[in-house]
Amino acid sequence: MSYDRYLAICRPLHYAALMNRRFCLQLVAASWISGLLGNSIILYVLSRLVFCGPNKIDHFFCDLIPVIKLSCSDTHLMELVVFLLSSIFSLPPLLLTLSSYLCILSTILRIPSTTGRQKAFSTCSSHLIVVTLFYGTIIIVYLLPKNNALRDLNKVFSLFYTVLTPMANPFIYTLRNKEVKNVLSKDVRKIRAFLRENTGT
């Protein structure tokens, strides 16, 4: 999405040529293949661990790091693999996204009209907030050193990237659409009218 926004704002005349169907399919394929490859490596190394102790996870859900802590075998290799893959799959995309937004910001600041700047910035700000929330919490959970203070906070932070970000995405992107806002306001009016009729007020 950051590359799409970069092209739309920084190179609008080249957008149709650069963001074509073939390139979109390549981006999707790269995402799927890299995700499958990373998860396959983690599952392979995880399957080599021996679990012989308690089977209670100190977490809200079956997250990778609490599962690793249940192992009674040496987990250094697994922890190294998780750190390396987390670094590879979080830091470069975050840096690319932030660098594209720096280019976008410099382009927005050169727009002469105030309304044009506001429209361009509002288009990107919601995506940047979601990206920062998603990658920021992933970096805190998987890349920062594990200490007692962060251990309990990691449970909360993991809810951000697993629950809050996917739940917020539809609201952030669809509520910016005028048609969705109109339909939503009509539905709210219908619900209010229905409640007034049924409650007699």
Image (tube, rainbow, N blue to C red):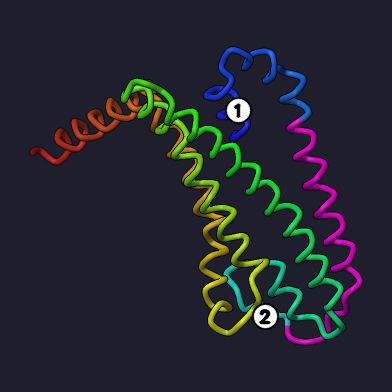
**Callout count:** 2
Q: Is residue 191 left or right of residue 143?
A: left
Give the camera-side residue of 134 and 88.
Answer: 88
- CA neighbours of label 2 inside 10 A, class few (<14), some (14 to 19), many (20+): few
* Residue drawn 77% across the image and 40% down it: 32
Up/down of 149 relative to 190, above or below: below
Q: For the C terminus, which image quadrant?
A: top left
* Residue drawn 33% across the image and 21% down it: 113
- CA neighbours of label 1 inside 10 A, class few (<14), some (14 to 19), many (20+): some
* Residue drawn 61% across the image and 82% down it: 147
Residue 149: % across, % down: 53, 82
Up/down of 197 relative to 113, above or below: below
Q: Which residue is mark 1?
A: 4
The residues bearing labels 1 and 2 have C-alpha atoms spaced at a distance of 43 Å
The magenta segment:
27-54
Closer to the observer: label 1 or label 2?
Answer: 1
Residue 43 lies within the magenta run? yes
Hey, what amino acid is under mark 1? Asp
Mostly what secondary structure, the magenta segment? helix
Residue 159: % across, % down: 54, 61
Q: Which residue is mark 2?
A: 56
Residue 30 lies within the magenta run? yes
In terms of secondary structure, where does tag 2 sit? loop
Residue 42: % across, % down: 83, 61
